[in-house]
Image (cartoon, rainbow, N blue to C red):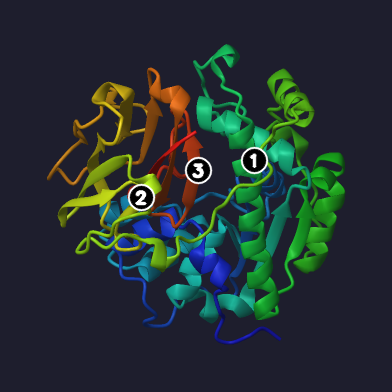
Amino acid sequence: MIRQPLIIPDIMRNSPRPNYNEILRHLPAKPGRPVRLPPPLHLVFLCFTNRCGSAYLGDLLHSTGAFGPAGETLNAGDVLRVCREHGIGTFLEYFEHIVQRDARGNFFIVKVAAEQIALLVQSGILDQIIGRSDFVFLNRVDKLGQAISCTIAEQNNRWAWDSPSQFPNEQLVYSAKRLTEQIYYVMLVNQCFGQFFALNGIMPINVEYERLAADPQGELDEIARRLRLPGLPIAFEKLRFRRQAGEVNRQWRSRYLREPDTPAECFFGILPEQQTASVTAHQRADEQQTFVDVLAHIHNVGDVKGAGGMWIGQPRTGRWVEGFSIDPRRGLSQLDLEYQSISHPDQPQEWTLGGEYCGTRGKSLPLRGFRVQLGNVAAKTFRCEYFGFFMDGSTVGPMTAGEICRSITWQPLEAFKIVVSRV
């Protein structure tokens, strides 16, 4: 028995949801008419986190001939592109379109992130098809190995073994903090899946990546049993994907486990409402944190001012930060402070000196990251930390010493806080 209607756990609602948010900004996704799919069709949702081995599992299943390719067709880019090309006006119509397009025999398979499960529930689709759906939950036990793989891929953009790359290994940047962020993020998303399954009485088909790599046919035999299929013999000659881990992965793993100062925790929580700065009220922060004043230009709002130590912006409104300036006070000069805005991951702006504005105004161009650093003597007598709240729901920080403050998904910045204090 499965709960009806399905419920979305709070952790899934409050976790980063870039595809969910982007799709809902352009397409109606409220429950409407019944879903129209062929009666015998069975749906398989391959639940994954980045670098857990889902492409490999999808490749194995596809090689059996029982399934089409397990694509990521619920990503916002694919959804909105296909809707434009085919004149599709709702998410329900889009889902019907890809199911009928990509089904193989009596099965349709698709990769889903936790946020896309939430979208299927929110749109009323999953409640209607839950009786003929199965969930394959792929979990990688070695979270550090997964984090290393994610961190490398986000730098060289090689998400598949055969993806072209002109990015040499020598340019990869090791960061213990980034690896720790990735570990916590993967664990957070896995917890989203786990709570969704548990609260709704769903028993997924659990697959461990390590078991799959050691005995792929054994894992597929268990999947076949759960799907009530006579068998899923792998055609190894048809496989496309291979393992990508190499010497860099081993070096980073060894370094991370040797370093005594590896970050012990990271926070991907929700910014408390009481900590946010109102755009209509100028609240004065603690006197010890007012070594700077901050101005931000908010989309469809205008310029907003605040003091150091305050959150500036409007979280959860879709009103992003377009630019900002930081004015030094109380012993700091313009030359002691510099900062940089990032509107595109590959095109950061020039460093800006204290008191000067960086970013844009009135161009609807959101900041997706920023960084701040102290210079001269001030770097020895003051400490600067900064935090960001992003449109995917993540809070990132504290960042220091010129580190880039941005979400894992590079979503627009909605609020930020600059804290300058004496050492």
Of 31 and 263, nearer the camera is 263
- Disc nearer the start of the sequence (1/2): 1
Tell me if mark 2 has few (under 14), some (14-19) or many (20+) residues whose alpha carbon lies within 10 angstroms of its own: few
Which residue position is annotated with label 3? Answer: 398
Q: Mark 2–mark 3 contact, CB under 8 Å?
A: no
Q: Is residue 16 visible?
A: yes
Q: Can you say whether 7 is above or below 397 in the image?
A: below
The correct choice, above or below, for 423 with respect to 250 in the image is below
Question: Identity of the amino acid at label 1?
Answer: Thr
Disc 2 secondary structure class: helix
- From the image, tell me which residue sits under label 2: 287
Residue 259 in the image, given as x and y percentages of width and height: 74, 27
Report how far apart the C-alphas of labels 2 and 3 lie in the structure: 20 Å
Residue 239 x %, y %: 69, 36
Relative to 348, 322 lies left or right? left
How many numbered marks are there? 3
The disc placed on residue 180 is 1
**Residue 51, percent from left and from top:** 64, 41
Three-letter amino acid code of the residue under disc 2: Glu
Residue 366, position as x, y percentages in the image:
26, 44
Question: Residue at 66% across / 78% down in the picture?
Answer: 199
Q: Is the residue under label 2 in contact with that under label 1 (CB below 8 Å)?
A: no
Front-most of 308 and 357? 308
Q: Tell me: 401 left or right of 3.
A: left
